[in-house]
Amino acid sequence: MDDSRPSSPGAGAVPRKLVPPPALCGFLLLLALIFTVSYAVGTSAGPVAPGMHGTSTGSGDGTSTGGGMQDMENMHSGGN
């Protein structure tokens, strides 16, 4: 008499529910590759506008180039 039991389909194997689909893995790998290449190209190209700086906080005497309300005040007084 043969007393062997049938093996369960999930015994010793990784359950299929825990493994992401291959298409998702490929998409994430491609996405990471695109970002890496994009970063490398941007780094090698350098800054687009080297003389451009962020907004500055001036003293309000019209010499700041940051824009904002300081420049609007001079507009109504005729620039004097």
Image (tube, rainbow, N blue to C red):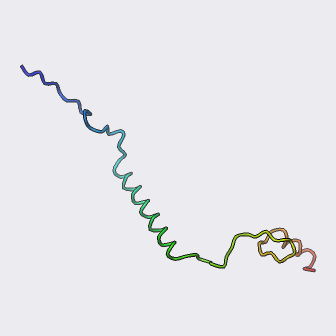
Residue 12: x and y, percent? 25, 35
Q: Position of residue 16 (x, y in %)?
A: 32, 39
User: Eyeballing the image, is 68 above or below 29?
Assistant: below
How far across and how far down the image is residue 23, in percent? Answer: 36, 52
Q: Residue at x 62, y 78 (%)?
A: 49
Closer-to-camera residue (47/79): 47
At x 23% / y 30%, what residue is drawn?
A: 8
> Can you say which quadrant of the picture contains the N terminus?
top left
> What residue lies at 84% left-to-right and 68% top-to-bottom?
69
List x then y, in percent, for residue 63: 83, 77
Quick check: 51 above or below 23? Answer: below
How many marks do you count on the picture?
0
Q: Quadrant of residue 26?
A: bottom left
Instruction: Please state, as top left, top right, bottom left or bottom right, where the C terminus lies in the image.
Output: bottom right
Give the vertical position of 22 relative to 12 (above or below): below
Viewed as shown, does residue 46 lie left or right of 32?
right
